[in-house]
Image: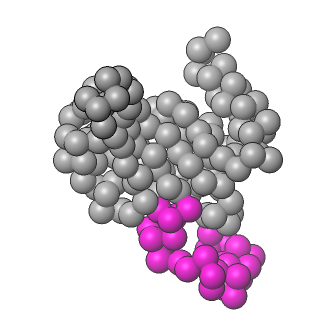
Amino acid sequence: VFSDRGSRVDYKVGTMIEIPRAALLAGEVAKVAEFFSFGTNDLTQMTFGFSRDDVGSFLPTYLSSGIIVSDPFQVLDRNGVGQLIKMAIENGRATRKDLKCGICGEHGGEPSSIEFVSGAGMDYVSCSPFRVPIARLAAAQAEIKKGKH
């Protein structure tokens, strides 16, 4: 198409990291991907083994019993999902130094999740339109906390 049109378009090829195995093998994936977009809704679901369709039947009990501190579909689970994200970014960038990483999904608009992923080295967040103002503010606050004005 480029030769037929006599023009060129710069583009990057990347991948979604939505399952634990992709996060675990991020160094290999980065050989062919120029960016990672972490789909944290699916990554959370698969890491916990919870179905978002069924979670309403037991999550309130888990929360009230202290089994989990917050709804992992609302606030990023730093100890499990977060560790997969950190490891994937580190291993991906060990392979490809200029690897861009971001988050997409509901966590991309939640302030404490944005602060965490900013600290983990993510470059961008993507969220639903109504969360954009909150995400922008949270991202700016996270950068200020890191000392990047």
Placement of 90 over or under 44, stated as above or below:
above
Which residue does the image show at 74% across and 39% down from the upper left? Answer: 132
Q: Which residues are magenta?
A: 41-69
Measuring from the top left, give residue 69's x and y in whole percent. Answer: 66, 64
Q: Relative to 53, is 90 on the left or the right?
A: left
Check the image and name the residue furthest to the front. Answer: 4
Residue 55 in which image quadrant = bottom right
Foreground of the two, 49 or 34: 34
Residue at 58% from the left image edge and 21% from the top image edge: 146
User: Quick check: 134 above or below 149?
Assistant: below
Q: Residue at x 36, y 62 (%)?
A: 20
Residue 98's spot in the image, x, y percent?
Answer: 32, 25
- Count of picture labels: 0
Towards the viewer: 12 or 4: 4
Task: Please say whether residue 69 is visible from this viewpoint.
Answer: no
User: What colour scheme has been applied to the protein in the rendered image?
Assistant: one colour
In the image, what residue occupies the spot 47% across and 62% down? 43
| Image location of residue 95, percent across then percent down | 21, 35
Q: Please identify the quarter of the rendering in which residue 144 is found.
A: top right
Give x and y (percent) for residue 71.
67, 66
Q: Quadrant of the N terminus?
A: top left
Q: Is residue 86 left or right of residue 104?
A: left
Q: Quadrant of residue 100?
A: top left
State which quarter of the image contains the C terminus.
Answer: top right
Say above or below: 9 vs 58: above
| Residue 80 magenta | no
Regarding residue 44, the answer to whether it shows in the image is: yes
